[in-house]
Image: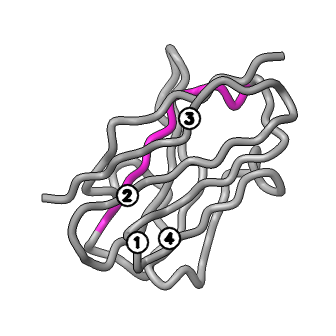
């Protein structure tokens, strides 16, 4: 069983930055991603990175503002969020999958493991 623990969320003003971290227990080859869910809305894809970090992918609304990266030695994936907007407010979830470590996965159903989430609130 893999456990994912997110951190780094908080309250920030519009235009500000936050850096989310997600630490995975155990050592394996994971494709990893970040999703977010606002109240009353479905969970949506934000960004993904494959095991070797050679490929990344972003939803259009965060391109140029968010950067996903990983440190495999630390079993950690990061989401650097710059130029934050009020519409970025959501609970952010880290996800991991061992079945397709070299793939970029963008659907909720493609991931095996999920963290508990960390709240990001952007005030206007």
Q: What residue is drawn where x is 71% and y is 47%?
A: 81
Give the Cα separation between the discs numbered 4 and 2.
19 Å
Q: Quadrant of residue 32?
A: bottom left
Above or below residue 27? Residue 43 is above
Residue at the disc numbered 2: 23
Residue at the disc numbered 1: 74
Above or below residue 37? Residue 35 is below
Q: Secondary structure at mark 4?
A: loop
Mark 3, other Cα within 10 Å: few <14 / some 14–19 / many ≥20: some
Q: Quadrant of the N terminus?
A: bottom left
Asked if residue 47 lies left or right of residue 113, the reply is right
Q: Quadrant of the C terminus?
A: top right
Give the Cα separation between the discs numbered 2 and 3.
14 Å
Give the Cα separation between the discs numbered 3 and 1.
20 Å
Mark 2, other Cα within 10 Å: few <14 / some 14–19 / many ≥20: many
- Range of the magenta residues? 87-97
- Residue 25 spot, x, y in % from top left: 24, 62
Question: If you read the primary sequence from the N terminus, does the residue marked by circle 3 or circle 1 appear first?
Answer: 3
Question: If you read the primary sequence from the N terminus, does the residue marked by circle 3 or circle 4 appear first?
Answer: 3
Disc 4 versus disc 1: nearer the observer: 1
Asked if residue 73 lies left or right of residue 37, the reply is left
- Residue 9 spot, x, y in % from top left: 56, 35
Question: If you read the primary sequence from the N terminus, does the residue marked by circle 1 or circle 2 appear first?
Answer: 2
Residue at the disc numbered 4: 104
Residue at the disc numbered 3: 9
């Amino acid at each position: 069983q893999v456990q994912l623990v997110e951190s780094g969320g908080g309250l920030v003003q519009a235009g500000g930055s936050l850096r989310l971290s997600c630490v995975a227990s155990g050592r394996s080859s994971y494709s990893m991603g970040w999703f977010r869910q606002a109240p009353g809305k479905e969970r949506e894809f934000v960004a993904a990175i494959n095991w070797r970090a050679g490929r990344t992918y972003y939803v259009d609304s965060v391109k140029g503002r968010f950067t996903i990266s990983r440190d495999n030695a630390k079993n950690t994936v990061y989401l650097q969020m710059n130029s934050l907007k009020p519409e970025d407010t959501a609970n952010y979830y880290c996800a991991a999958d061992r079945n397709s470590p070299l793939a970029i996965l963008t659907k909720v159903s493609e991931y095996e493991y999920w963290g508990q989430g960390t709240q990001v609130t952007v005030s206007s």
